[in-house]
Amino acid sequence: MMHRILFLFLAVAFLGEQAPVQGRQTSILLDDFESYEDGALPVKWKAQLNGKLVPLTEQFTHKNESFYVKKEGGKQFVRAYSKGEAVHIALQNGEDLEWRLSKHPVLSWDWRANTLPLGGREDKDDLNDSGAGIYVMFSMEGIIISRPKAIKYVYSSTLPEGTVVTYGKLKVIVVSSNLDGIGMWKTITRDVAADYKEVFGGNPPDRPMIIRLWSDSDNTKSEASSDFDNIQLLRRF
């Protein structure tokens, strides 16, 4: 009898370990860029045309403005390149991903700056270039002119990590800096819900609208190259 009870206990424990808990995914991988060919466009993402997100095609890439997948030393990632331009690709919540901050408030990614805009400063309008950025848009606000309410996490050419810059409804947070060096992969983990409360006050919308990968060098008329990988949403532990 005792052997039978012990067997049933172990069986239930085993099944409990194997069964996923509904709605309790530890992480959601948005992209690790492993499903593409070397040199391909990351077509899971979208481009912007006339204020709308559209499929990413070759028309949105040229010698001074591109996102393409690159393989290096067994690692595959996406490279953003701009020369006097601004480049960005996006995923839209509800279409390209399902993101609820109540379940996965943390955003994590790997990035590497190869070349940053010369003299770029996110706190100066005429020098406001970020060689690498991840932009989370929460809502559109305004009666006459509607503008995005968003946080932009950046790799800055000149500002120290921890700097926060305000452009109306846009909050720029420096999470990596040229002051600490470039050329090495860095893993960034941000509690987006907590950051929203810190910079805006109050609770964020549960469903951010858009997440965007970004690189620009248009204000400084210089050059930027940066790599992104392992973009994922995490639960808070």
Image (cartoon, rainbow, N blue to C red):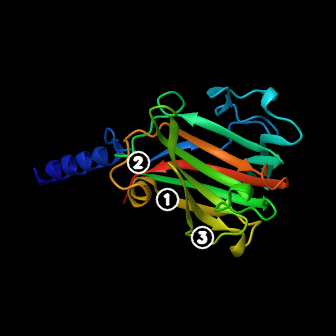
Residue 37 in sight in this render: yes
Residue 108 or residue 156, whichever sits in front: 156
Describe the element under mark 3 as helix, strand or loop: loop
Q: Disc 2 vs disc 1: Cβ atoms closer than 8 Å?
A: no
Q: Above or below — where is 35 with respect to 199?
A: above
Q: Earlier in the sequence, mark 2 or mark 1?
A: 2
Q: Earlier in the sequence, mark 3 or mark 1?
A: 3
- Residue 171 position, x and y percent, is 53, 55
- Residue 192 position, x and y percent, is 45, 53
Query: Callout 1, which amino acid?
Result: Arg
The furthest residue to the left: 1
Say which residue label 2 marks: 104
Residue 129 in sight in this render: no
Say which residue label 1 marks: 190
Residue 4 or residue 127, whichever sits in front: 127
Say which residue label 3 marks: 161
Q: Above or below — where is 166 with respect to 206?
A: below
Label 3 vs label 1, nearer the camera: 3
Q: Residues within 10 Å of mark 1 (few under 14, many from 20)?
A: some
Describe the element under mark 1 as helix, strand or loop: strand
